[in-house]
Amino acid sequence: MTKNHFTATGIVFNSKKQILMIYHNKLQVWLPPGGHIEENEIPDDAVLREIYEETGIKAKILPNKQDFESDNDCKGLKRPFTVLLENIEGDWSHNHIDMVYICTASNEDFTMQKSEASDIGWFSIEQVKELKTYENVKQSIKKATEYFYKYEGNLLRDSKKAVVSLSKYLSRHLRHKPHEIDLTIDKNGWANIDELIEKSKEYKGRDLTIEMIIDVVKNNDKQRFKISDDGKKIRANQGHSFPVDLELDSVTPPDVLYHGTAKRFLNKIIENGLLPMSRQHVHLSETEETALKVGQRHGKPIILTIDSGRMFKDGIVFYLSENNVWLTERVPVEYIRFNDWGEL
């Protein structure tokens, strides 16, 4: 007689888009958390219970647009991502009707909660491919990952968060690591847009498009990028960690500029002045407000006042980027006012 048992499995993603997996002692393979649906238990509750019992992770089921809206007479349950009939004994005499859900983690610090498992971890999709597990598990996780990225992409599209996310991606590859996607940057910092799109296939689960790039160039609040007059190339306006010639002319700066940084760097600045570190130039701001925002990115902020007018008179060259960031090779300590940086 065939025995069919209902089970629930959770493919859980964390904030880094990694997948939660446990090592099953009896089966000697890696699996997503899951287990039997208990008597009188609904699948929604079962999958979240199993995830927590096995890993200590509190999870949420990813919403589905096709979820039924509840009313007084009927409650809509969360739709599984897929439902599988799993052959447990090899002859289809004992099967699991497995409801597989895509979930997100509310916390990321896991704990071993059940004796069935001896190890647990977060894995990228590429790492999952190398784990010892069943092919149907790898296939389910691959499809779930594609769906998750598409879902997340839909949420981010046309939002400020989408602009910020793509801006970070472009900054990474136009300013710092073009080699990661084998992108060609010319001596003036320009990349061919068609090549960038081709090398960025499946950005966040969907193809990068020219419309998305134009949106970021126009709407990024820091105006980090510029598209060439012919519309065929893009480059970062400043901040490169490899040599490029941005073709900027020397300009006369205001008498005073500002530099935002973190308090923990103050002693080194007192000793060495401001250095470009991994970048080509030291970045300076025209307003204290802008400098404060820069400093807040690095920790407890301080604002340094720079005697830029005196620097210029002493022969130190300044440039102004396309997005109004003032650039200079370094700021010697004698041009920095430490007595009015004002802890904030």
Image (spheres, helix red, strand yellow):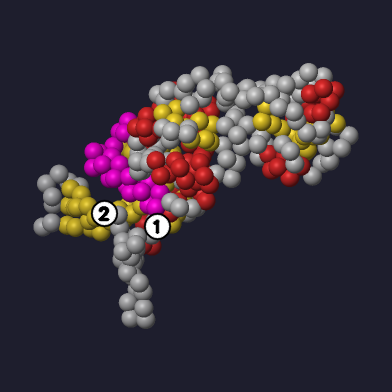
| Residue 206 picture location, percent across and down | 35, 43
- Name the element at disc 1: strand
Residue at the disc numbered 1: 61
- Name the element at disc 2: strand
| Residue 196 picture location, percent across and down | 40, 31
Q: How many marks?
A: 2
**Residue 109 to residue 242: above or below:** below
Residue at the disc numbered 2: 82
| Residue 157 picture location, percent across and down | 43, 51
In reply to whether residue 151 is colored magenta, the answer given is yes
Q: Quadrant of the N terminus?
A: bottom left
The foreground one among 229 and 245 is 229
Q: Range of the magenta residues?
A: 127-154
Q: Amino acid at mark 1?
A: Ile
**Residue 18 seen in the figure:** yes
The residue located at (19%, 52%) in the rendering is 85
Q: Amino acid at mark 2?
A: Thr
Spatial CA distance of label 2 from label 1 is 13 Å
| Residue 324 picture location, percent across and down | 65, 36
Residue 15 — which label?
none
Rendered image quadrant of residue 312 = top right
